[in-house]
Amino acid sequence: MLLLKPGLRLYKTALDRAAQEALLGELRAILCDAPLFRPKMPRTGKEFSVRMSNCGPLGWVSDLSGYRYQPHHPETGQPWPPMPESVLRLWRDFAESPVEPDACLINYYDETARMGPHQDRDETDFSAPILSLSLGLSCRFRFGGESRRDPSATIRLDSGDVLVFGGPARKMFHGVDRILPGTSTLLTPTGRINLTLRRAE
Ligand code: MD3
Ligand code: FE
């Protein structure tokens, strides 16, 4: 485990290649039920470059009316598929939290997608950490402080890495500067999948 700053823990290759492939099989089944959608920015309606889906009781969505957690897919109207046991196990193994996650956001990045610096503030309980798992192409991940103006640093996240954001790191600014093409053969078509496990309510 690497402590990047207070509350920010990195576990390199928390999942080995076989475990990544097994989890990917489960994610493919989830994405058949709950297809990736392209969220839009509130007010402007500008589309995200990242496509998203969710599993678990609640899913994060964004559209013209705002950001929120809701129990159904915004396009199919169906409830989100359940969180796989392997995903819950990740939380139990690494999150060091007594509460269970009720939301798992699935982000898909093609080679050109990025995510600008932002804070995650749509949850009601900030005492629970957020756990992120990276699969597929590596990325340059940027993290800073609680103010947008605070200095920031970057690290490379590779397939199988787990990051846990808790305590003083829970409200830090963070984003994905860019995807690094040619760094993984896990996904076909190529790209990066990031799972974020959260306690939304
Ligand atoms: C730090 N996703 O979905 S995961 C997001 O790689 C998001 O897809 C990025 O930021 C991705 O909101 C980064 C890492 C992450 C997730 C949540 C955080 C970092 C965080 C919440 C608080 C602080
Ligand atoms: Fe975020």
Image (cartoon, rainbow, N blue to C red):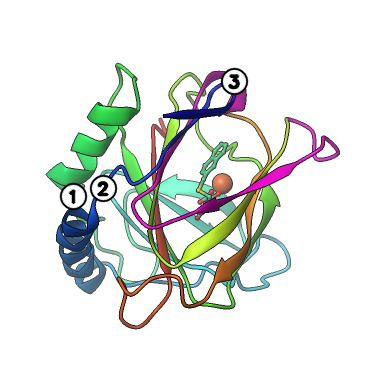
Mark 2 is on which residue type? Leu
- Tell me which corner region of the image, top left, top right, bottom left or bottom right, holds residue 8: top right
Magenta residues (range): 146-169
Dot 3 surroundings within 10 Å: few (below 14), some, or many (20 or more)? few
Residues under numbered marks 3 and 2 in contact, where contact means CB atoms less than 8 Å apart = no
Q: Please check the rendered image and state whether residue 34 is part of the magenta-colored stretch, yes or no.
A: no
The Cα atoms of the two marked residues, 3 and 1, are separated by 32 Å
Q: Which of marks 3 and 1 is nearer the N terminus?
A: 3
Q: Which residue lies furthest to the bottom in this view?
A: 189
- 68 sits to left or right of 141: left
Residues under numbered marks 2 and 1 in contact, where contact means CB atoms less than 8 Å apart = no
For mark 1, what is the residue? 82
**The label number, if any, that marks residue 15 in the structure image:** 2
The Cα atoms of the two marked residues, 3 and 2, are separated by 23 Å
For mark 3, what is the residue? 6
Q: Residue at x 56, y 68 (%)?
A: 179
The Cα atoms of the two marked residues, 2 and 1, are separated by 21 Å
Q: Nearer the viewer, residue 79 or 90?
A: 90
Q: Residue at x 18, y 53 (%)?
A: 19
Q: Quadrant of the N terminus?
A: top left
Residue 139: x percent and y percent?
A: 54, 61
